[in-house]
Amino acid sequence: MHDSILRQPMRWFRVEGPVSRQEYLQLGFALGFLKYFVEVLVVGFLTGRFFTPLDFVNPWLNSKAEFLNDMPGAAVVWLLFTLPFVAVAVSMSIRRASDAGLSPWLGLAMLVPLVNLLFMSVLSIVPTYDPELEAELDLSSAAVTAAFTPPALQEDDDVAVPRYGDHGLSRTAAFMRGLGAGCAMQVFTGLVSVWVLQEYGFILFFTAPVVAGAISGAVFNRGYRWRKRSLFGLIALMNFVSFVLMLAVGLDGAICLLMAFPLLFPLSFFGGLAGRAIVGVMHKGRDDRRGMIGAAIMLPLCLLLEPLDDQRALHRVDTTVLIDAATPEVWQQVVAFPEITEQPAWFFRLGIAAPIRARIEGTGVGACRFCEFTTGAFVEPITTWQAPKDGSQLGLLAFDVTEQPLPMEEWTPFSGLHPPHLDDGFVSRRGQFLLEPIGNGKTRLTGTTWYDIDVRPRLYWKAWADPTIHAIHYRVLGHIQNVCEEPIESESRLGR
């Protein structure tokens, strides 16, 4: 090795060229230590908690989300910080597998939790593949076989030798094959995950796009190494066609698919580059269709690991407004507010459930509040009833959520489509309204929702859920603010 791979960062991301086990170990330990060191410092600074080595090696990304549960922005940055390390790990593992004489497709096992830890250990031990030694072993094996084979059964020397690749295919034909292979992989994995196993997990949203992109890129480049711009066009079209097919087969609705695509697109592009490299320079002229088929089979099988990542945690969202009214007046509107007549924001009009009105049956603890949305009503038994008697007292209305409507109405060509994630992908557990007098007859009103999500990776989907809940809060709190301040505005106009 002329120069340490640690000094050649451009080699980390390129899915080309061999990587020895010494280089694999060097870079693996160096980047692992760097990532852990940064995460220990950041988590400690933001939360005051210690991010242990066991937390770091835990294969489930969701278990780490709790450290930044109340900081959605930091959680998204953490996810983005992790992606380059994942890309380097996959790149180095593909090349290390090829260097060891194994199928480079095995490198995609780095995207499978638990399996990746075992696979890294194996790649750190297996020596570099020696083609001359293998040729000698093949000759010896052939000689032994020939010596013990009856003459009548020996084959003729004039046999066709299969050549690697489909050199006769035009670019259009290769493009269509790659498109079909990638789309089939995406849609099939989605059907198995959603409708058979009812899992919206790491494999579906993280591993599947990389593997589908790799298979698509590999099939496209089997006979000829096409330009990268053609590959990127293929991957972009594959994602679009997969989107249409998922809608057509009723896999999911347009809203959720659009929300997933910012994650799927870059991952599938990286997969396309990996597949192109696997069948290109690294392949050494051998046909490795069995490795590609193995990667395709691995994907749905790995979905069986998803139930192991069953770590649901409560997430909290707080939204505050200042109201020019005393706490007793604000309390009356918090308990039950009249219909919101203001037109919903554009994202609510796309199908996301929007609040309309609230009513209550009874008073005090044990009463039941019904908050009606465009998709149905939340049933909210009251657990804390602290009504302010005058403008100097705090008010607190807390409640559990025992029933909730669908979080959205999906856009789909099928009427009544009901993907499983609409039932338990997002679940509101409890909520509260806190009224704080701040002097001069004004009130600080804070609405809080505790929820959990069962769609993974949660760090990504939480980045969608928190702003949506804030928007719901603002619609309710803003309406309460307008109702409470309207008499004041009217008196001001009369006074003028």
Image: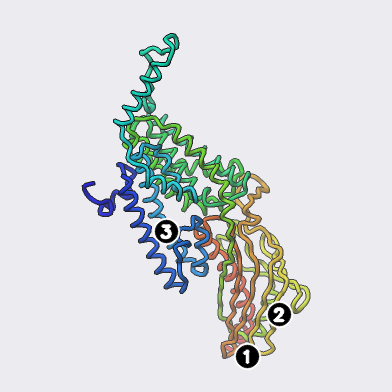
- Position of 161 with respect to 181 (left or right) is left
Q: Quadrant of the C terminus?
A: bottom right
The answer to whether one can see residue 230 in this image is no
The residue wearing badge 1 is 392
Residue 88 place in picture, x, y as percent: 36, 51
- Which residue corresponds to mark 3? 80
In this view of the protein, can residue 309 be seen by the observer? yes
Specify whether 16 is left or right of 480. left
Q: Nearer the viewer, mark 3 or mark 2?
A: 3
Residue 45 at x, y = what percent? 42, 73
Q: Nearer the viewer, residue 127 or 480?
A: 127
Q: Which mark is residue 385?
A: 2
Crowding around mark 1 (Cα neighbors within 10 Å: few <14, some 14 to 19, many 20+) is some
Decide which of tag 2 and tag 1 comes sooner along the chain.
2
Is residue 280 depicted above or below 464 in this figure? above
User: In screen coordinates, is 141 left or right of 482?
Assistant: left
Which residue, as the protein is rendered here, is positioned at the far right?
A: 362
Image quadrant assignment for residue 404: bottom right
| Amino acid type shown at disc 1 | Ser
Return the x and y of residue 270 as percentages of the image width and height.
40, 46
Label 2: how many Cα within 10 Å (few below 14, some 14–19, many 20+): some
Relative image position of residue 260 (x, y in whole percent):
51, 52
Amino acid at circle 3: Leu
Residues 215 and 322: in front is 215
Three-letter code, disc 2: Trp
Say which element carries label 3: helix
Judging depth in this view, the residue of 149 and 307 nearest the camera is 149
